[in-house]
Image (cartoon, helix red, strand yellow):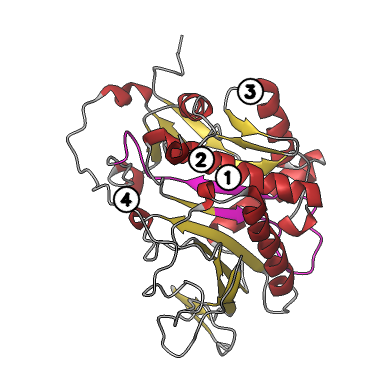
Amino acid sequence: MIDYTEHPHKRFNPLTKEWVLVSPHRAKRPWQGQTEKNTEEQLPSYDPKCYLCPGNERATGGNVNDKYTDTFVFTNDYSALLQDTPEGELNDGLFVAKAERGMARVICFSPDHSLTIPEMSVDAIRKVVDVWANEYTELGKKDFINHVQIFENKGAVMGCSNPHPHGQIWSQSSLPNEVQKEQNSQKEYYDKNGTQLLSDYVKAELDKQERIVVENDTFVALVPFWAIWPFETMILPKRAVQSVKDLTDAEKTDFADIYKKLTTKYDNLFEVSFPYSAGIHQAPTDGQNHPEWYMHMHFYPPLLRSATVKKFMVGYEMMANAQRDITAEQSAARLRDLPLVHYKQK
């Protein structure tokens, strides 16, 4: 009989309708591949050369940041999407292209250059959640914006070029690939069952308690059954909520609280500022009703065995199928057992 903690097997992701190959026996293999340099250093609270610090001139020259005291939002000086993009479409057999309008914003989480989310107070993180809700609402009101993607890249290994605590919001006319997959799957599930896919999933995970990392009154952080990255997690509300703007006051505070708790456990895992890409998936802003949607936040961290050994998506993963070596249950147990006090505060 198969032992899912020892034998190779596949797990299905109902959100994307894709499979991940799980090979737990491979976790025992010795590592002789590339290691990353641990570049963590003590940062100042204010860096006069940082283009995100309060009152500083930004990278473009001429634009100056407000002397902000909590959060600060501005239009990205190097936006990947532009609202004045002219209309245009190419449809020539296999050569297909279409203009894409949008807007990109940057959110400075804190004026303190030295902080990251796990080192900020819940009250300070709550202001970030409030900004998310406001930006989702205001950007979504624009007639050419049908999707608002809130995300954070943390750490140089994730391509983050500035250590100042910040995130981004890209909004655009169409649904991007990953969101379109989730839209299709959630709509199909809702039409068939009359309930949200992730609502039923959260209830099942809370009942099993096998992959729960941390929870509070209204939110839960867990390692999804179909996780690809070694310590991949999701933050989900305990009730069906379509978007961050639909959260109650108490839920917004709980969102901030669990965001801090999860990222604190990440940092404590290898006692390093843990890199990741995180993003919120929520209902489209196309003016339509989307009862199938259930807001959630993905975390994709690359570290595998230590602060210097990361997971690479190469070879089989690029050419065939996503694959992981440790099970979701093993990852959840390791994260769950970590303290909620940040290692720097011990």
- Picture residue at 35% right of the left edge, 44% below the top: 317
The answer to whether the residue labelled 1 contacts the one labelled 4, judged by CB atoms less than 8 Å apart, is no
Q: Is residue 305 magenta?
A: yes
* Mark sitting earlier along the chain (3/2): 3
- Residue that carries the numbered disc 1 in the rendered image: 260
User: Along the polypeptide, which appears first: circle 3 or circle 1?
Assistant: 3
Say which label, 1 or 4, has the lower sequence index: 4
Residue type highlighted by circle 3: Gln
Element type at mark 4? loop
The disc placed on residue 299 is none
Label 4 belongs to which residue? Answer: 40
Q: Is residue 107 above or below residue 207?
A: below
Q: Amino acid at mark 1?
A: Lys
Classed neighbour count for the residue bearing mark 3: other residues with Cα under 10 Å, few (<14), some (14–19), many (≥20) = few
Disc number lying in front (3 or 2):
2
Report the residue at 73% width, 79% height from top. Answer: 143
Q: Residue at x 58, y 77 (%)?
A: 103
The residue type indicated by label 4 comes to: Glu
Q: Which residue is mark 3?
A: 209
Q: CA distance from mark 2 to mark 4?
A: 16 Å
Foreground pick, 185 / 222 = 222
Of residue 132 and residue 101, the one placed in the foreground of this image is 132
Secondary structure at numbered mark 3: loop
Residue 149 position by quadrant: bottom right
Q: Which residue position is annotated with label 2?
A: 264
Stretch of the chain drawn in magenta: 279-307
